[in-house]
Amino acid sequence: MVDRISVTDGRIPPKRKIPVSQKRVAVVLASLVGTMTVSAAVLLVMEGGALGTAMPGWAINQSNVAAMVDLDKPLRPEGWNFIIIYESGDLAARADSLADGRVTGGSSPTTVRPQANFHFVIDSAQSGTMDGLLETGTSWTDQKLGAYAGWLDSRSHTISLYQDAVGVCLAADLGREPISEAQHQTLLQLVKVLQQRNHIPPECIRFQWELPDAPLPTPAQQALARRFRASL
């Protein structure tokens, strides 16, 4: 009996290639990308540990933000009656550089600014983390006063009417470019949660340039305020 693989000239015919399922390839690639993304997110969250916690911009929604805002201990007895939104003037700012008074990427790198441990900081793509990353400062977790309403103007520190305000800082320099969509969405979700948890009405949400005796806002600052309030 002759073996069928050598019927002709004794040579073994080449094996046929088994077709590869495109669906299988897509599943494998998606799993790989997902694993890498989650790993990167874990590293970013670990980086934020020194000053509190951090949430990647792509993961921002009201449930995730609420988990960062809610604490195991009661809120300060005096309560939080305002929300003040600040512009860092520094595209590369982070919670740690703001708390140290360091300028890491502003229009005037030699400027020395007051130290400000904000309750929350929303990073930019140039912060070295992730665009729209939400950082929670220790001033919130410890329920202490954060940046005062007059930051960067220290004259308002002792006379401010808004020392019971939650301070949210955008890593931004509006004179150079507007905030990103990721930062915008993070800001919206954070403010909504803070409003719900602290019963803060819309009229008590202010931007830094809307405070008493603040310099006149620039067109870029006015545009940001309009866009934010239209989306809130």
Image (cartoon, helix red, strand yellow):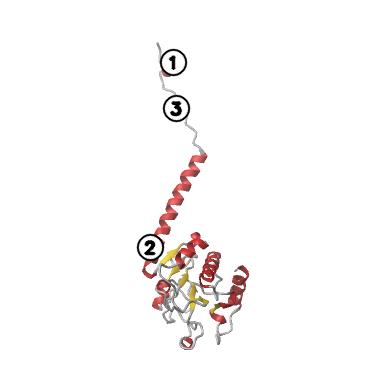
Characterize the local packing of mark 2: few (<14), some (14-19) or many (20 or more) Cα atoms within 10 angstroms: few
Question: Looking at the image, is mark 3 or mark 1 earlier in the sequence?
Answer: 1
Type of amino acid at the residue the image marks with label 2: Met
Q: Position of residue 104 (x, y in %)?
A: 43, 74
The quarter of the picture where residue 14 lies is: top left
> Which residue ends up furthest to the top in the rendered image?
1
Residue nearer the viewer, 195 or 220? 195
Per the model, the C-alpha gap separating discs 3 and 2 is 51 Å
Residue under label 1: 7
Residue nearer the viewer, 180 or 194? 194
Labelled pair 2, 1 in contact (Cβ < 8 Å): no
Labelled pair 3, 1 in contact (Cβ < 8 Å): no
Give me the residue at 49% from left, 40% from top.
24
Say the numbered circle drawn on residue 46: 2
Give me the residue at 51% from left, 85% from top.
161
Residue under label 3: 15
Q: Position of residue 159 (x, y in %)?
A: 48, 88
Give me the residue at 55% from left, 81% from top.
209
